[in-house]
Image (cartoon, rainbow, N blue to C red):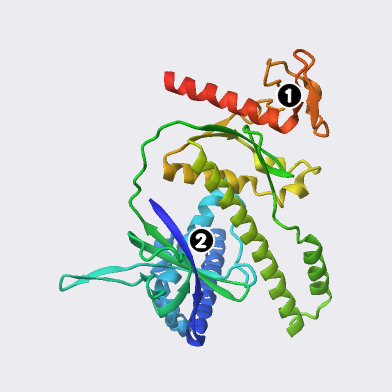
């Protein structure tokens, strides 16, 4: 299993300069060869692969000698990123764009493993006891993170160094052995995902989306940025404040999602939820703005990989299943409940009073159990 560990980096001034230079060089290589591919395709209707482009880097360092100062793996990885961008384009995504300084501030380097006189050497080393990481061209850099870990057992594959809001981070990708516990289905739960309440469980528990709304603060900073003179120090300071605010919002969302998913997986063995099409949900202008502050897609993504790690089962029912309209007691389908403003209703058949969200979570639970039993019989 490949697992990423993110640490905060504390480089000295020389290391900061080297990181910034490598980011600039990686961006330059990406843009240079993207421009070449566009020109080449217009002339010959063909373009070079990443491996063909890598062979051209040595000759390019003669014209641009400052390319020699950075990690060569970072330059090669930029070309593989460009090839991946073209693959996504062929699969229906947008055409690759040139990288700009404001948006792209990272580079990736690989761990080169070699042996000499029976001893193994790694270009990337992680020392959690002394809070140090060794990176190519940077040597030892101070780190912070994972206070409860003294050692990570596995093979380091690569590291991605990122600059964000004038802070530096490193994401270390490690190949670990995954030992799954025995699957014993004791507890089962159904989840209805919402906007105001992020998760509504079949145990009649509502988990609110407690991430603070910073829209007013963000709007004020963006207005000030629009008025600031381009290239001025005040504009730079405002951009830094906006970046830090976005970072604060992202971190708050991550903290909330990990707390929710850890609790759900610790207490339950089978988790049932809807297979939401979040992308199409944004087409509904009534809820699109609220969805930007509600990380539903990220919640499902994290639940999937954590269930895989812990050998728990995640069942996703059909996205078109009318969980809100069906009475969880007698099965009567009430078409009137399509109206989202109707939060409570009474079943015309069995006269059971329903809370819209609790009823939906119970129906999701029953439908998930049905799918699980069919899977066992098959």
Closer to us: 249 or 120:
249
Q: In the picture, which quadrant includes the C terminus?
A: top left
Q: Nearer the viewer, mark 1 or mark 2?
A: 1
Image location (x, y in percent) of residue 165: 63, 73
Closer to us: 94 or 159:
159
Image location (x, y in percent) of residue 323: 68, 27
Residue lying farthest bottom?
14
Q: Is residue 256 above or below residue 217?
A: above
Q: Residue beneath label 2, please?
A: 82
In the figure, is residue 197 to the left or right of 40? right
Disc ID at residue 37: none
Q: Is residue 68 above or below residue 96?
A: below
Q: Does residue 109 appear anywhere in the picture? A: yes
Residue occupying the point 52% across, 62% down? 37
Q: Residue beneath label 1, please?
A: 325
Q: How many marks?
A: 2
Residue lying farthest left?
117
Task: Give SS at disc 1.
Answer: loop
Image location (x, y in percent) of residue 343: 80, 32
Task: Give SS at disc 2.
Answer: helix
Residue occupying the point 39% across, 76% down? 58
Q: Residues within 10 Å of mark 2 (few under 14, many from 20)?
A: many
Contact? badges 1 and 2 (CB < 8 Å):
no
Residue occupying the point 46% across, 80% down? 67
Tell me which label, 1 or 2, sits earlier in the chain.
2
Q: Does residue 32 appear anywhere in the picture? A: no
Task: Residue 39: name its quadrant.
Answer: bottom right
C-alpha separation, residue under disc 1 versus residue under disc 2: 47 Å
């Amino acid at each position: 299993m490949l697992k990423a560990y993110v640490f905060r980096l504390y480089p000295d001034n020389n290391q900061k300069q080297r990181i910034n230079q490598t980011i600039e060089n990686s961006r330059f290589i990406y843009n240079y060869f993207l421009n070449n591919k566009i020109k080449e395709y217009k002339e010959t209707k063909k373009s070079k692969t990443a491996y063909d482009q890598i062979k051209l880097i040595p000759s390019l360092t003669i014209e641009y000698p400052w390319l020699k100062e950075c990690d060569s793996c970072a330059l090669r990885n930029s070309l593989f990123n460009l090839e991946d961008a073209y693959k996504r384009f062929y699969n229906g995504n947008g055409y690759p764009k040139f990288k700009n300084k404001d948006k792209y501030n990272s580079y990736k380097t690989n761990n080169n493993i070699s042996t000499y006189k029976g001893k193994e050497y790694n270009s990337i080393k992680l020392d959690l006891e002394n809070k140090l990481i060794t990176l190519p061209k940077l040597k030892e850099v101070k780190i912070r993170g994972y206070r409860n870990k003294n050692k990570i057992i596995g093979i380091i594959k690569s590291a991605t160094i990122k600059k964000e809001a004038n802070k530096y981070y490193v994401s270390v990708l490690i190949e670990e052995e995954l030992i799954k516990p025995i699957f014993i289905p004791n507890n089962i739960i159904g989840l209805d995902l919402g906007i105001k309440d992020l998760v509504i469980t079949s145990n009649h528990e509502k988990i609110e989306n407690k991430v603070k709304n910073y829209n007013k603060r963000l709007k004020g900073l963006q207005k000030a940025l629009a008025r600031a003179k381009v290239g001025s120090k005040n504009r730079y300071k405002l951009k830094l404040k906006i970046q830090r605010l976005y970072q604060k919002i992202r971190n708050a969302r991550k903290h909330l999602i990990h707390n929710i998913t850890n609790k759900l997986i610790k207490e339950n063995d089978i988790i049932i939820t809807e297979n939401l099409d979040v992308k199409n949900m944004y087409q509904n202008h009534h809820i699109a703005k609220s969805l930007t502050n509600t990380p539903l897609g990220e919640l499902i993504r994290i639940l999937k990989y954590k269930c895989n790690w812990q050998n728990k089962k995640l069942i996703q029912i059909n996205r078109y299943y009318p969980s809100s309209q069906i009475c969880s007691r007698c099965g009567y389908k009430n078409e009137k409940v399509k109206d989202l403003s109707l939060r409570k209703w009474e079943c015309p058949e069995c006269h059971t009073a329903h809370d819209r969200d609790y009823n939906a979570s119970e129906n999701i639970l029953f439908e998930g159990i049905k799918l699980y039993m069919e899977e066992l019989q098959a």
